Image (tube, rainbow, N blue to C red):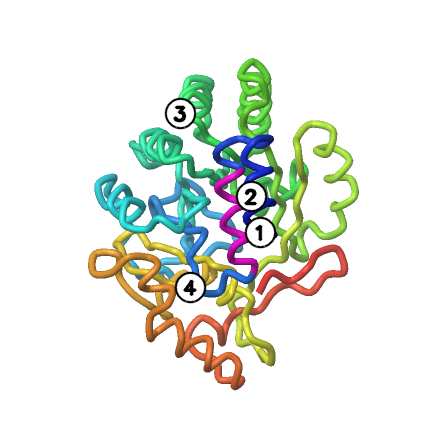
Amino acid sequence: MKTDAIMKKMRKIVSKRTYKRCEAFIRDAWSAHACRTVHFETTSLCNLKCVMCPVSIPQKFTRVQRVLPLDMFKDVLNRCDTILSVGLNNWGEPLLHPQITDMIAFCEQKNLDTIFATNATLLTKDLSKELLSAGLSNIEFSVDGLDNTYKKIRNTSIDGVLQNITDFLEINKKFGDRTSTCIVCTVGEENEAEIELFRRKWQPLVDMVRFQPRINFEPAHRSTPCKELVRSHLVVLSDGRVVPCCADYSGSLLVGNVTQNSLQEIYNGDAMSQLREDHQKGVFSGACLFCHEFESDQTEKRF
């Protein structure tokens, strides 16, 4: 009864979307049995060759590069009513998908939060307006260093990227800052020393600056279960196969396929249950054996 009273009061003071999110997590405080967020690999194509990314290395990234069909995207979300938040990237640059704004608009119609990370090289003024008009909730700009450091990591100049981000921020203001903005810096040995300067540069300009450790994809001596398995989260690859974690770039830990089952069915399916059980027993396989995060006191491990 107390929960019902809280939700009744909240319904009067928050937006429909916020109410939906709060209701789900209050009624299911530990949501290990409900898939709440999904990241779609809208495309596995990318226009950059970043030093830390397996997409840049053909010997590592052996999956066929493609774009996720819009019809499949819609069907997946229509068949799973537990989803609250939709990510629109995994491995690849989401702005290469020709229907990215259609995907955002579809989520907006369903009152679902949207987010994606972009390298911002393709973020023109016109595209910025389209993304904002479609209802994009959150955007993350992947910027991994200052000037020369950025160029060493991303293999391209930062000048155009800075201009594109600046343009987006200005246009976003005209839309009433409707989209939350974040700068994400992946930290490794190349840029660790720049973190404080980087923070000072970006913090006044965006809503959040986040630092995450680089994954080196080297043999790892794991001893604890991965947090991804109980974060109410799944990743749909561009061909419809499903993995539990964004770090699994090769699809080695397949737990289902959205052409055969809903996300909710997959999240509570035998493959996910077995993976959780294995991790609790200290048995690790596939991508988990190579999930080695860069050690730094400036970042917190994600996995």
Q: Along the horizontal axis of the image, is 145 left or right of 271?
A: right
Point out the frontmost of discs 4 and 1.
1
Q: Secondary structure at mark 2?
A: helix
Determine which residue is flagged by label 2.
Answer: 7
Determine which residue is flagged by label 4.
Answer: 244
Q: Along the horizontal axis of the image, is 251 left or right of 69?
A: right
Mark 2 burial class by Cα count in 10 Å: few <14, some 14-19, many 20+: some
Q: Along the horizontal axis of the image, is 189 left or right of 140?
A: right
Q: Secondary structure at mark 4?
A: loop
Could you give the CA–CA distance between mark 4 and mark 3, rounded to whole angstroms? 28 Å
Q: Which badge, 2 or 4, comes first in the chain's sequence? A: 2
Q: Mark 3: which amino acid?
A: Ala
Q: Which badge, 4 or 3, comes first in the chain's sequence? A: 3
Q: Which badge, 2 or 3, comes first in the chain's sequence? A: 2
Q: Mark 4: which amino acid?
A: Pro
Could you give the CA–CA distance between mark 3 and mark 1, rounded to whole angstroms? 34 Å
Dots 2 and 4: beta carbons under 8 Å?
Answer: no
Query: Residue 134 has which mark?
Result: 3
Residue 112, given in percent of the width and then of the height, sits at 43, 38
Residue 260, given in percent of the width and then of the height, sits at 20, 60
Q: Which badge, 3 or 1, comes first in the chain's sequence? A: 1
Q: Is residue 39 magenta?
A: no
Residue 9, given in percent of the width and then of the height, sits at 60, 37
Determine which residue is flagged by label 1.
Answer: 3
Could you give the CA–CA distance between mark 4 and mark 1, rounded to whole angstroms? 31 Å
Could you give the CA–CA distance between mark 2 and mark 3, rounded to whole angstroms? 29 Å
Q: Using the image as rendered, state which of residue 41 and residue 188 is in the foreground.
A: 41
